[in-house]
Image (tube, helix red, strand yellow):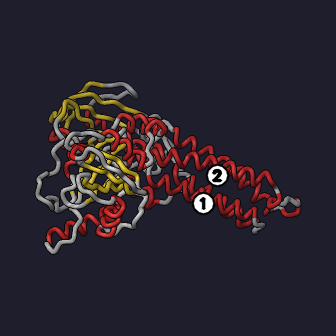
């Protein structure tokens, strides 16, 4: 962890969203923030005391409002921080920001305030990421989970696992460093038992982290099918709006149509695609090529078939898989039998998961929403915190390393190999909370934050 003050040059940014508003906030952080703020306001500031004052530039009044001083280290960034709360005019806020920069501050990079909070030990990396997740939360469920991550619930689980790994590493490495003590860790059942316990705890955490990742980042769901099966109608019903043009003419959809929505608290990117068929029409071929690429990226593929057509479902899905360049039997496929309102009875004999709906009447749509959640593997009530793909990846690396360590014990491999696998697992956990991190990783994470946070 980087000590406080190492990155303490003065930075400033507008911390409220673009556009007009009743209140606008400019944030200033770094060495000399109080001195600069007192120069701009011509007022004496006291820590954690709101002072109503004017904001000046070259003897002219720019605005008036509240100014609050937070002294080091009792601030968001751990540095001297001053917040100017004025009127929410973009012009006025920019003038105030220009004034601060003319007198010694510089424009903050995206996420730089949060980055400094992390570098100065005010929060760990997972908590810092939770700030961005809280700001971007698209549902109340996501907001609550992000708040729990910000309060350290996810980090505490990771740190507990890391502490257990550290104790195990100390024991194993002591056996390597002091061979004269005659400690044979490969024959020590306690080591194997402890690794197995850690693997189970890690598996439990990984399951919840995957849920948290879905809650934060959502899932990509793609609609595939032959022309006129009702894909666009399904998209409109799920989206709750007329997002796609619907006609009786086949091949209406030529390009990808993407709609963001929430299903059961989970963000979904729903993508409608061109109808799949053999065609010589150039534009339609381009649309089908894009459908093929989108299918490869999707986490769930809704293959839509027409209930009014007397057809073998498995054969039709296999035909569509060939046209979309998917593997027959792909586990991501959920077959949606549409236009159920046009048939009185239909025998379905298929190896795929199936959902019966009518986009016209709305029958079966709520069940379809539930099936999409199930197919993704999302269970809202089992999501205690938000997480990201990099957290899932790190836990998977740690899990694989522990598996290799246990394999090394069971097969009497060298003690050094067991120790190295434990180190890799420990480091992977450290990457989540930031006790082990590379500068390029930090740059990538914080560059995704909004300016002013």
Q: Which mark is residue 400?
A: 1
Q: Percent position (x, y) of residue 276?
A: 24, 65
Between 452 and 386, the one lying in front of the other is 386
Q: Pointer 1: residues within 10 angstroms few (<14), some, or many (20+)?
A: some
User: Which of 255 and 337 lies nearest the eye of the viewer?
Assistant: 337
User: Are the two marked residues, 1 and 2, in contact with CB atoms closer than 8 angstroms?
Assistant: no
Residue wearing tag 2: 199
Percent across and percent down for residue 444 are 39, 57
Where residue 88 sits, quadrant-wise, is top left
The image position of residue 369, as x and y in percent, is 34, 42
**Residue at coordinates 41% horizontally, 39% vertically from top-left?**
80
Pick whichever of labels 1 and 2 is earlier in the sequence. 2
Q: Assign the C terminus to one quadrant of the image.
A: top left
* 17 relative to 298 in the view: left or right: left
Q: Secondary structure at mark 2?
A: helix
| Residue 269 appears left or right of 193 | left
Residue visible at 34% across and 49% down in the picture: 449
Mark 2 nearby-residue class (10 Å; few <14, some 14–19, many ≥20): many
* Residue 118 appearing in the image: no
Instruction: Give the CA separation, mark 1 to mark 2.
Output: 9 Å
* Left or right of 407 on screen, residue 207: left
For residue 321, the mark is: none
For the question of whether residue 67 can be seen, the reply is yes
- Which residue occupies the extreme bottom position in the image? 280
Count the labels in the image.
Answer: 2
Secondary structure under tag 1 reads helix
Residue located at (74% from left, 51% from top): 193
């Amino acid at each position: 962890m980087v000590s406080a003050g190492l990155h303490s040059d003065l930075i400033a940014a507008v911390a409220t969203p673009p556009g007009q508003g009743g209140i606008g906030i400019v944030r200033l952080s770094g060495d000399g923030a109080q001195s600069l703020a007192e120069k701009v306001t011509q007022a004496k500031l006291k820590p954690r005391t709101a002072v109503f004052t004017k904001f000046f530039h070259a003897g002219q009044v720019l605005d008036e409002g509240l100014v609050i001083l937070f002294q080091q280290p009792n601030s968001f960034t751990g540095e001297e921080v001053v917040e100017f709360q004025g009127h929410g005019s973009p012009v006025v806020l920019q003038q105030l920001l220009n004034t601060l920069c003319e007198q010694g501050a510089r424009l903050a990079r995206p996420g730089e305030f949060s980055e400094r909070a992390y570098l100065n030990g005010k929060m760990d990396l997972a908590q810092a990421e939770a700030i961005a997740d809280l700001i971007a939360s698209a549902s109340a469920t996501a907001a609550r989970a992000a708040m729990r991550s910000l309060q350290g619930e996810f980090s505490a689980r990771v740190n507990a696992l890391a502490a257990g790994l550290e104790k195990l590493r100390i024991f194993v490495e002591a056996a390597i460093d002091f061979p004269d003590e005659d400690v044979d860790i490969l024959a020590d059942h306690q080591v194997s038992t402890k690794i197995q316990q850690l693997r189970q705890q890690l598996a439990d955490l990984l399951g919840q982290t995957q849920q948290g990742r879905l809650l934060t980042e959502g899932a990509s769901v793609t609609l595939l099918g032959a022309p006129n099966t009702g894909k666009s109608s399904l998209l409109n019903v799920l989206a709750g709006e007329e997002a796609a043009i619907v006609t009786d003419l086949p091949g209406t959809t030529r390009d990808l149509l993407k709609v963001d929505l929430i299903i059961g608290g989970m963000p979904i990117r729903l993508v409608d695609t061109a109808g799949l068929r053999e065609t010589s029409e150039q534009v339609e071929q381009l649309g089908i090529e894009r459908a093929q690429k989108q299918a490869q990226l999707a986490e769930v593929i809704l293959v839509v078939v027409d209930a009014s057509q007397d057809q073998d479902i498995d054969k039709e899905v296999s035909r569509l898989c060939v046209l979309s360049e998917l593997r027959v039997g792909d586990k991501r496929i959920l077959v949606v039998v549409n236009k159920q309102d046009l048939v009185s009875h239909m025998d379905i004999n298929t190896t795929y998961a199936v959902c019966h709906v009518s986009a016209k009447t709305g029958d079966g749509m709520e069940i379809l929403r539930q099936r999409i959640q199930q197919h993704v593997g999302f269970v809202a009530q089992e999501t205690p915190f938000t997480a990201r793909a990099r957290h899932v990846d790190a836990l998977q690396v740690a899990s694989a390393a522990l598996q290799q360590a246990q394999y090394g014990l069971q097969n009497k491999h060298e003690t050094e190999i067991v120790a190295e696998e434990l180190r890799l697992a420990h480091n992977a956990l450290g990457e989540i909370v930031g006790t082990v991190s590379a500068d390029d990783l930090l740059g990538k994470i914080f560059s995704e934050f909004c300016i002013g946070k």
